[in-house]
Image: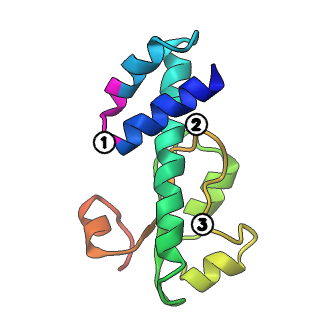
């Protein structure tokens, strides 16, 4: 079953399917609840996106600033909260922190590192660019 789940998620990413379409496709191959399927799909898409971002982050100058984007609410894990509280660290500061990389904290994370740009500010980020 696990290879089938992985294949359906990868097919969805490569085929640029909407999350809802992938969830519907998984219902046919996995004996899981819709909440479990949604977690698998969201985490799969997030891991793929973060892997691509990490490759891009490797190429930017060390003084490039980043921000950890995502909700800061009662569901936010302490690892994510600590990254959010870093504010807008440079690439060097992130790599020199206890986290040491641009990976998400844990499975099913709702957050991601983003390069601090005017686009991010336009999406509601309130800090300094």
17 falls in the magenta region: yes
51 falls in the magenta region: no
Secondary element at image label 2 = loop
Indicate the position of residue 58 as horizontal and vertical percent values: 54, 78
Q: Which residue is mark 1?
A: 16
Q: Are marks 3 and 1 in contact (CB under 8 Å)?
A: no
* Cα–Cα gap, marks 1 and 2: 29 Å
109 versus 27 height, above or below = below
Secondary element at image label 1 = loop
Q: Quadrant of the N terminus?
A: top right
Quadrant housing residue 97: bottom right
Which label sits on residue 78? none
Q: Which residue is mark 2?
A: 75
Lower sequence index among marks 1 and 2: 1
Q: Which residue is mark 3?
A: 102
Residue at left offset 55%, top offset 61%? 84
For label 1, the crowd category at 10 Å Cα-Cα, with few meaning under 14, some 14 to 19 and many 20 or more, is few
Secondary element at image label 3 = loop
Indicate the position of residue 19 as horizontal and vertical percent values: 36, 32
* Highlighted magenta segment, given as a residue range: 15-21
Indicate the position of residue 59 as horizontal and vertical percent values: 49, 82
* Cα–Cα gap, marks 3 and 2: 21 Å
Lower sequence index among marks 3 and 2: 2
């Amino acid at each position: 079953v696990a290879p089938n789940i992985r294949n359906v998620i990868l097919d969805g990413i490569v085929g640029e399917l909407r999350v809802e379409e992938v969830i519907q496709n998984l219902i046919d191959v996995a004996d899981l609840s819709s909440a479990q399927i949604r977690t698998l799909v969201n985490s799969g898409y997030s891991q793929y996106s973060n892997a691509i971002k990490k490759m891009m982050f490797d190429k930017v100058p060390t003084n490039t600033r980043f921000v950890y984007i995502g909700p800061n609410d009662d569901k936010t894990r302490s690892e994510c909260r600590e990254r959010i509280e870093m504010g807008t660290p440079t690439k060097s500061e992130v790599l020199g922190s206890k986290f040491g990389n641009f990976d998400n904290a844990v499975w099913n994370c709702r957050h991601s590192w983003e390069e601090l740009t005017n686009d991010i500010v336009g999406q509601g980020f309130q800090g300094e660019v």
